[in-house]
Amino acid sequence: MDKVIGIVATREKLPQIIKEISLGERYIITQRSKAKAIIVSLEEIETLEILADRKLLRDIVAAKEDIKNRRYSSYEEYFGSNQ
């Protein structure tokens, strides 16, 4: 669940906020009672970027299908055993 915190309190509690974000919390930062920003973990940003990239999502789905149907090469097959 998102936590809402004012910008002044954010400055005062930033170390604690960072710790909680690393545990999965999200913070909505307000200024004068209006939401202005959100603090999320790096993992969540990476996930959002992947979800926003339609081509990457299609590539991931295709790769999963290839793995499921055993359409892949091992490292040794691809690069040779001398690498």
Image (cartoon, helix red, strand yellow):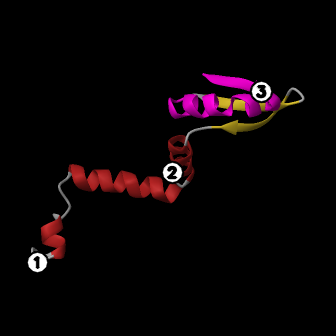
Q: Earlier in the sequence, mark 1 or mark 2?
A: 2
Q: Amino acid at mark 1?
A: Asn
x and y, in percent, of residue 71 in the image: 20, 60
Q: Amino acid at mark 3?
A: Ala
x and y, in percent, of residue 9 in the image: 77, 27
Quadrant assignment, res 79: bottom left
Q: Amino acid at mark 2?
A: Ile
In the image shown, does 50 or 4 lie closer to the viewer? 4
Q: Is 14 on the left-hand or right-hand side of 30?
A: left
Q: Quick one: label 3, few (<14), some, or many (20+) residues within 10 Å?
A: few
Residue farthest along the left direction in this orientation:
81
Residue at the spot of label 3: 9
Q: Earlier in the sequence, mark 3 or mark 1?
A: 3
The magenta span reads: 1-24
x and y, in percent, of residue 36 in the image: 80, 37
Residue at the spot 57% in from the left edge and 50% down from the top edge: 52
Tell me whether circle 3 and circle 1 mark residues in contact (CB < 8 Å): no
